[in-house]
Image: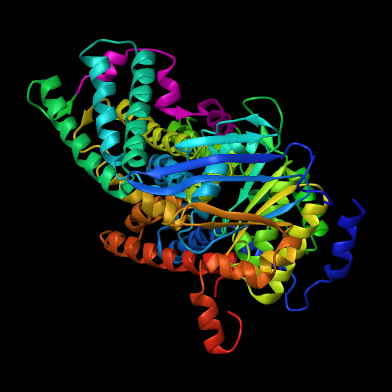
Amino acid sequence: MADIQSNSPAPIIEARDIVKHYGSVIALSGISMKVLEGEVLCLLGDNGAGKSTLIKTLSGVVKPSGGELLVDGKPVTFSSPRDALDAGIATVYQDLAMIPLMSVTRNFFMGREPRKGIPPFRYIDFKHCDAVTREEMHKIGIDVRDPNQAVGTLSGGERQCVAIARAVYFGAKVLILDEPTSALGVAQTSMVLKYINHVQQKGLGVIFITHNVRHAFAVGNRFTILNRGKTLGTYAKSEISIDELQNMMAGGKELQALSNELGGTI
Amino acid sequence: MTEISKIPAASIKSDERLKKVSVLTSLMRRPELGAVAGLVMVVIFFFFTADTSMFSLSGMMTILAPASQLGILAIAASMLMIGGEFDLSIGSMVAFAGLIFGGLLVNFGQPLWIAILFTLLFAALLGAVNGQIVIRTRLPSFIVTLAFLFILRGLTLVGLKWATGGSTQLRGISEAVGDTSIAGLFSGLAFQGFFAWLAENNLIEKFDNGMPKVAGVPVSVVWFVGLAGVATWVLLRTRVGNWIFAVGGDANAARNSGVPVDHVKTGLFALTACAAALVAIITVLDAGSTDARRGFQKEFEAIIAAVIGGSLLTGGYGSAIGAFFGAIIFGLVSIGLTYTKFDSDWFQVFLGTMLLLAVLFNNFIRRKVTGER
């Protein structure tokens, strides 16, 4: 990703002036952003900045009130998450990714079960599914002893990785990760970050939503900062330092002052 | 792609903190384990306390007939529960479908096959309405279907009085049906030829005139076993089955993964109502009449059988074959007590205790399965 700014190919996904109103509340007032192949775009913002609304718009959960969404340079409208999935945009939600009571295999193929047999007697090819699940888990370094074990037995980091692996396996071009590390411990966070990096190298575009600047800086190529439904700007990694990012995200000097007061970095 | 293979190499060591999956654990993962254990215990109990005639072929048929009627409801109820919803209106639906069915035959003089088809379609429609109300209003299905419990029961009473001119029992169904071959699919006994052959070869008890003491299997038992088989196959092996588990486990996560949540739930409500209609058709044809108390409190019995069968009240987990065993336990105890010296009114005490134990056991199993502590 040497040259991001100029003459690069059409972005995989681009949002132009996205506006979203909920009644009289303006959640997004003209957000623009784009993601290129093999790049991690970090969306940073404090609570209420409009991160969730933006993801919901990109993943087809809500329709924008205005603005344009382009996939591979062509305008699209999504009326359901299914549409977004079919366009290659997969979203991994913080806590809604997996169903704990179902097996890893059943979760992995949920909504896209491969079938065999003649209708109406078609059935899921579980032998194939189990093999694929085991292999994909092996690739990302999760040793699933038994793909029929419930997802509830996996750790939080493993669940995130399984959800990402599932999206990748089903041919996602863009991955939207909604605070994948916010509920995780240090070791599990590094496991997820490592995997994000790995996915990026495969040529996928990643939108990484977080409010942890360190996690963002570890894997991000560019950073878009949201504040109160607006973009405060997009910066390449070379253009900005981790402290500047932190300040912009917090939206002012208060945090810096507090940080000095406490004698460290927040 | 070389990058991919590098990562696991470093971290694929097996975690020494995890124990191997034992046979016991993988058995514990089966939701119907509790029901099977319960069945074994109940059989042992009756083996020591009941008259031996209970375990004769005719004793078995006496138990299986009511168990199968409840079981058809319980299997559908368990699928709906796995899908995360309840239907408290199925008992009333049995009565209401009975009215529709009887009314079509007696009052409108329709042939049997039209009456059956229309009753099933009408029930499916009502079930779908139930489902749509639950989905659109986002009210708990408990409340919506509780309302329908009373609405349908009341409609049945009103309708019966209208159809009969003041009575709450509609008679004359056997006469209206006449002699058609379809009736054999829904009433009477199956495999009579086989049982006659068994008697001929002295494999089962027979009367002095050579006729077998048990002439065949009640048709409802055949439906019961067939539905249990189909439902289990659907749940465990098909895409729709996966969707049912997903929808009950977490409707949001399922929707985000592209599962048509609303269709699945509506379909399950329609299926449950159809099961009630099937029970109505079978029992009305057997009795030759229908009345307002048909299916009374069956909704609770069906849910209890499903819970005993390992279905979680919160959805996302359970089994149809478990509900099958749950219904058999139900039949064993309700009929079995009359073979013992105990007062058969102990039945309800037993039922409540069994339900409580089953719920506790299910919760324990769920924690085991999901690794919650």
What secondary structure predominates along the stretch shown in magenta?
helix
Percent of width and height locating residue A5: 75, 47
Towards the viewer: B269 or B326: B269
Residue pictured at 27% horizontal, 43% vertical: B144
Position of residue A198 in the picture relative to residue B23 (left or right): right
Can residue B229 be seen here? The reply is no
Towards the viewer: A113 or A119: A113
Quadrant hosting residue B129:
top left
Percent of width and height locating residue B146: 25, 45
Percent of width and height locating residue B338: 32, 55
Residue pictured at 34% horizontal, 58% vertical: B337
Percent of width and height locating residue B229: 57, 39
Can residue B72 be seen here? The reply is yes
Position of residue B146 in the picture relative to residue B163 (left or right): right
| Label total for image | 0
Q: Is residue B359 magenta?
A: no
Residue pictured at 74% horizontal, 45% vertical: A36
**Image vertical order of residue B353 relative to residue B35, above or below:** below
Position of residue A188 in the picture relative to residue B249 (left or right): right
Assign the C terminus of chain B to one quadrant of the image: bottom right
Q: Is residue B197 magenta?
A: yes
Residue pictured at 26% horizontal, 16% vertical: B104
Position of residue B55 in the picture relative to residue A93 (left or right): left
Region in magenta: B171-200
Towards the viewer: B245 or B259: B259
**Image vertical order of residue A212 relative to residue A100, above or below:** below
